[in-house]
Amino acid sequence: MTRVHNFSAGPAVLPESVLLEVQKELVDWRGAGLSVMEMSHRSKEYQSIIDDAMDTLKRIIGCGDDFDVLFLGGGASLQFLMLPLNFCPADKVANYIDTGAWSTKALKEAAISGKQMHIAASSKDKEFTYIPKSYQLSENPAYLHITTNNTIRGTEYMKIPEVPADVPLVADMSSNFLSRPYDFSKFSLIYAGAQKNVGPAGVTIVLIRKDYQEKLLGNIPTMLNYKTHLDKGSMFNTPPTFPIYVVGKVLHWIEDFGGLKEMEKHNIEKASYLYDVFDNTSFYKGTVVPEDRSLMNIPFRLPTEELEAKFIAEAKANRMNNLKGHRSVGGCRASLYNSLPIESAKALNSFMKEFEKKNS
Amino acid sequence: MTRVHNFSAGPAVLPESVLLEVQKELVDWRGAGLSVMEMSHRSKEYQSIIDDAMDTLKRIIGCGDDFDVLFLGGGASLQFLMLPLNFCPADKVANYIDTGAWSTKALKEAAISGKQMHIAASSKDKEFTYIPKSYQLSENPAYLHITTNNTIRGTEYMKIPEVPADVPLVADMSSNFLSRPYDFSKFSLIYAGAQKNVGPAGVTIVLIRKDYQEKLLGNIPTMLNYKTHLDKGSMFNTPPTFPIYVVGKVLHWIEDFGGLKEMEKHNIEKASYLYDVFDNTSFYKGTVVPEDRSLMNIPFRLPTEELEAKFIAEAKANRMNNLKGHRSVGGCRASLYNSLPIESAKALNSFMKEFEKKNS
């Protein structure tokens, strides 16, 4: 079996060792006589799986017991709604930094849910090709929300913005979660869809600081209320049991890799195979300002749309998948999440150089 | 490998043939060089998987194109909220028949979401041990909601209630979905968590009649709005891709089994191995009225709680898992979903007879 080089923006490549383990255990989990998919979520066996996933995550981010971990269904898009419902009271204002399509959806949902909303900064003026370096909070901010990596535009926060001590910082980390050692202690709430860096689609990880939980609001529909899920350890209703099990294995893989510092080195090295190409040719053009270049999602353009289509097709013929840019922006994009092997980045680097020679 | 006899109420047993297929394809789906878990939901390959699952479901229920199929995250519990938000206008009343814990949660959520709610019938007077045979609608009913099978109490609708032509009938079919040939044409909306009869946890199936979609309301948060998901074929955001893939395989298994009529025969036969025991001894007592006995979930009591604990423990030692009743009602319960083999029901029958001999 030859694995493809999978540059998908998500769902995305997973570590081959994790897939092999999942395959081995699929019909009969460790001699239990059943698949993880067939386990009651109330069984001791499954409880050990979800507990282990939560504990491994806490070790990786080094937060001790400062945060509670939730594994929820519905996607990060549902968090766009749950966040303001749970944490923005009527007399306060939900603040957002708008850095692209997903931030925009998040802030729109705060408004749709009837909350006061304020855009504290935006890079819309230059088509979201940079990360704003300053921001202006509203009066009475409930929180400041950032999107730490922008999957479509390919920008990423290298440094987390400073916030006043009384303003909770909240982040959608879906597309760079556990890819670098951010100072997690600065955040009050973090959420991330699993399907980029830490697992298959179908589960969203939410981390809520214990002291921030004191600010949880009431009168919220049951399933949208964080308290519902916190009180029951993500077991109020049946959680997405199998995706959580796979996430647990990816978390062990990250820990065994050496944790977030080693993961960052690995991701810097992979990204360099693309950014070095951009910096040494005018055939491929990166689309964002160099200082905010994402390690995860790297959009680029070729001289013409025809060449872009040819590039994507020839790459695919060479087993390099999913290099098409997001339909809203066009062009090309390579996503280089945690699990993408160095070899895939190297292969793309060689292919790009060769393609340039033949076509310029 | 010896499979356990898995009587879990959900997540529950899956067909062994499905698990073996999933295992075979896990690392490399049909030579594509990647796992289904790693596929972009926007890829042709994944689109073929979700389309096939939707088409197979429509063939099984024989609805032609009268319904649209949604595959959503968040669990059936999220549907308790989405249903009234989308289909109960301010001047109408959401009507419910209350047949146990899950119906009760559904009707409470209608009230929590600020809608007028009316309990059209209830079997609470006798601890939900029967299905009400009549009901009284409110003025201006938006819809009538029933729970076709009650997982905890073990009652099931043998016959769907007649409703006036202008009253939409809506059902939570989570625990008997595709286990018998109901007349699906009588329903306007059906929803079911997959993790009982048709797959692993993490995906909820929602069927909405095309003509009922004309009544969809507006001003609803994005992810709670059925229109969001209908307009994008369940691909507004990343759906739970792998659970949907497994559901697709279980649907093919149901179709290959002979469809819903054959499935019903199979389920009647399995349930008879328990109900015959109840009818021929006073050692085991069923807890519901005989005419409303569920084919799916069969609760029963033994003469004492001590004997119940002993029964559950000895059954487990004999590889019969998950025979403990729901924590809210105690006693014992066997769940006999579609995928449970006849052999498991026979094994339980023999064990019950033997246990009675030794302990009475």
Image (tube, coloured by chain):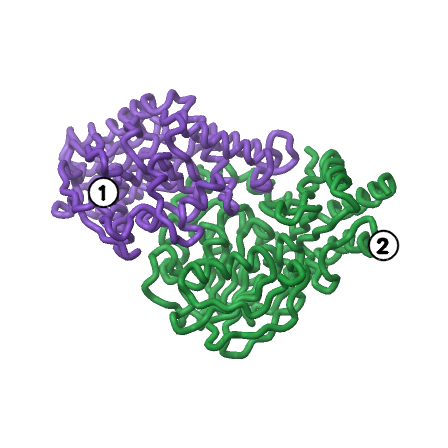
Chain colours: A green, B purple
Q: Nearest the camera: B265 or B185?
A: B185
Residue B297 appears anywhere in the view: yes
SS at circle 1:
loop
Residue at 18% x, 34% y: name it: B292
Residue A95 sits above or below residue B299 on the image: below
Instruction: Give how far across and how far down residue A317 sits, in percent.
Output: 74, 33
Mark toward the viewer: 2 or 1: 2
Residue A288 image-quadrant placement: bottom right
Quarter of the image with the N terminus of chain A in it = top right
Numbered circles on residues, count:
2
| Residue labelled with disc 1 | B153
Identified at 25% across, 44% down, the residue is: B142
Q: Quadrant of residue B211?
A: top left
Give x and y (percent) for residue B144: 23, 41
Query: Is B355 positioned to the left or the right of A333 in the image?
Result: left
Q: Amino acid at mark 2?
A: Asn
Nearer the observer, B226 or A194: B226
Which chain letter matches label 1? Answer: B
